[in-house]
Image (cartoon, rainbow, N blue to C red):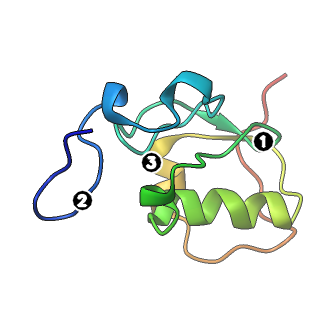
């Protein structure tokens, strides 16, 4: 696995250690993909402290519902059980 000198994180999906078994719809490597609160969260150890992944874990902990875009995940600062994503009918 080729890692960056600065951060020691994978540079592409193919370099991700969990890519072949990953079921997370939002990927912190490419910072793309909308995420529903009932879906999986990235499990790659290099990304567990990324803001968006931490937010996803907290949203799951608080049983928040809805669709969260990368922009929404990036901008969330406080989470409670009242935090909601986009409602999709």
If you read the primary sequence from the N terminus, does the residue marked by circle 1 or circle 3 appear first? 1
Dot 2 alpha-carbon crowd within 10 angstroms: few under 14, some 14 to 19, many 20 or more: few
- Quadrant assignment, res 68: top right
Q: How many marks?
A: 3
Q: Would residue 66 appear left or right of 21 to someone viewing this image?
A: right
- Quadrant assignment, res 34: top right
Which is nearer the eye, 55 or 5? 5
Which residue sits at x=12%, y=64%?
Answer: 6
**Residue wearing tag 2:** 8
x, y percentage for residue 1? 27, 38
Which residue sits at x=72%, y=47%?
Answer: 85
The numbered disc on residue 71 is 3
Dot 1 alpha-carbon crowd within 10 angstroms: few under 14, some 14 to 19, many 20 or more: some
x, y percentage for residue 50? 44, 63
Which residue sits at x=58%, y=66%?
Answer: 54
**Residue wearing tag 1:** 66
Q: Would residue 24 appear left or right of 72 to someone viewing this image?
A: right
Of badges 3 and 2, the one in the foreground is 2
Dot 3 alpha-carbon crowd within 10 angstroms: few under 14, some 14 to 19, many 20 or more: few
x, y percentage for residue 28? 42, 45
Which residue sits at x=53%, y=51%?
Answer: 72
Considering the numbered disc 1 on the image, is that residue within a helix, a strand or a loop? loop
- Estimate the spatial distance between the alpha carbons at disc 1 and disc 2, rounded to whole Å: 33 Å
In the image, residue 89 sits, relative to residue 53, either above or below, namely above
Considering the numbered disc 2 on the image, is that residue within a helix, a strand or a loop? loop
């Amino acid at each position: 696995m080729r890692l960056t000198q600065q951060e020691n994180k994978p540079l592409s999906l193919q370099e991700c250690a969990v890519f072949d078994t990953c079921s997370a719809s939002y990927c912190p490597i490419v910072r793309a993909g909308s995420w529903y609160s009932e879906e999986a969260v990235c499990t790659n150890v290099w990304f567990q402290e990324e803001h968006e992944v931490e937010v996803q874990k907290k949203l799951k902990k608080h049983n928040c519902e809805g669709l969260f875009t990368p922009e929404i995940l990036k901008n969330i600062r406080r989470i409670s059980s009242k935090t909601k994503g986009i409602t999709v009918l």
